[in-house]
Each structure stands twice: as structure tokens, then as C-alpha cells.
Image: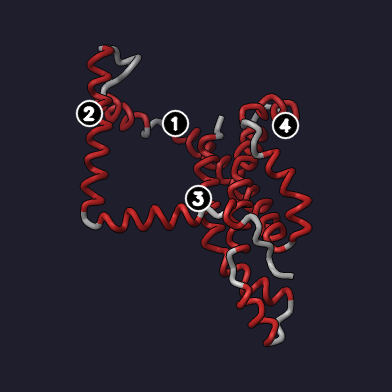
Amino acid sequence: MDPVGDKAGFYNSGNARLMREKVMGSLGQKQILYRLITIAAVFGIWQLAANHYHSEFLMPSPWKTMVTLTSVVHDPDVLKNLLLTLKRVLTGFLYAMAIGIPLGFLMGYSKAAMQMLDPLIDSLRQIPIMAWVPLTIVWFGLGDGPTVFLIAFTGTFPIIMNTIAGVQKISGDYYNAARSMGAGPWSIFAHIIVPASLPDILIGGRIAVGLGWMSVI
């Protein structure tokens, strides 16, 4: 059975990535200048807002924020909490990869699996992440459990979708060529599906890490 392709266009975030790289690449040397202008504009607006409020509590100035940040990063308690957060994000990310990649391979390759699991995946990923907070506290109690669950939950879906996209956009010629040389299902999976879909999986992982940081509570 060849991978199904009915949802390749919907799930494929690689198209957006390629378009962005094409636009950014066309800027050439101006790219750095544009980014510096953006950063300067952000800091300028920030400083204007700080001057407007005249309150370090409501809106500290950029300079005051940088000075405070320098002192804070040397605080042992802050470093301890930062390492704890990194541990939670990494643990949740690993769970998301362990769940999302096999499901993505299965749904991308099997039409039956896509038809059975796609409605469930589409339904779950529409639920706001904050709606899960009370349930996670009930299920896992206080501590690392709720945070790791939320990080893993939010990261699983982009990994699934990008893995599906990576599998579905593989040309059928590769499968036909491998079968003509006597390759079996496991050989095709290891030498065709995994290498060809790896770039999309990495894109999903990058998105999952970002969503994981946003899910830290």
C-alpha cells in the first residue's frame, strides 16, 4: 500500500517554510539590516511606553530591564528554577516525539489508520490548552505531572501533522523502485520513509518545542 495523499496539502507545513526561506533568501544582505531595524523599532516603542507610564512597575525601561536581567541570571534560585523548567520542557518534548512520530508514520502510510484516527486528532487539537489544566491537576496532582502533560499534549499534534506531510509527499516512484529490487516493508520504511520524512519531522519538533515553552505553567 502506498501512502495516502488526500491530506498532504493540509498537513504540509513545509510549503510555508519553503516560501519563507525563498522570501528571506531573496533579501540577501538587506536581511540583517531589516532585522536590526525591527529590533530598534521594538526597543524604541518600548522606551516610549516606559516614558509614558513613568513607572518601573507598569513598564520598566529597556535599560533597566537589561540591568535587572543581568543580576537575576546570577541568582542560584533562578538558575535552579530555570533548570527545572528545561527539564519539564525536554521531558514533555520527548513524550511528544515518542507519541507523535509513530502515529504520524501510521496515519501517513495507512489510509485505514488515517480514516480512523484523523477525526480524533482533529477534535483533540481544537481544545484550548487551558481547558486541560483542571483535569491535569486532578489526574497528576501538583508538581511536574500537569506541566509535562500539557507540554507533551501541545507538542504531539505538530509532530503528527508534519510527519504525515513528510510521508505523504514521498514520490511513488521510490516505492516502485524499491519493490522492483526486492525490498520488503521494513526495508522501505527504514531506507525510504524515515530519511525522506525526517526534514518535516524536524520542523514539527521545532514547532513542538516552541509550543512547549508556551505551555509551561
Task: Tell me the amino acid under the disc marked 3.
Answer: Arg
Image vertical order of residue 48 relative to residue 187, above or below? above
Image location of residue 15, percent across then percent down: 48, 56
Helix, strand or loop at disc 4? Answer: helix
Residue reaching furthest to the bottom: 181
Q: CA distance from mark 1 to mark 2?
A: 29 Å
Q: Give the residue at mark 2.
A: 44
State which tag comes first along the sequence, 3 or 2.
Answer: 2
Task: Tell me which residue sits at (66%, 57%) in the image.
Answer: 6
Q: Give the residue at mark 1.
A: 78
Q: Is 26 in front, or is 193?
A: 26
Q: CA distance from mark 1 to mark 4?
A: 25 Å
Task: Tell me the amino acid under the disc marked 4.
Answer: Phe
Helix, strand or loop at disc 2? Answer: helix
Image location of residue 139, percent across then percent down: 75, 30
Image vertical order of residue 85 relative to residue 206, above or below? above
Q: Give the residue at mark 4.
A: 140
State which tag comes first along the sequence, 1 or 2.
Answer: 2
* Res. 61 image quadrant: top left
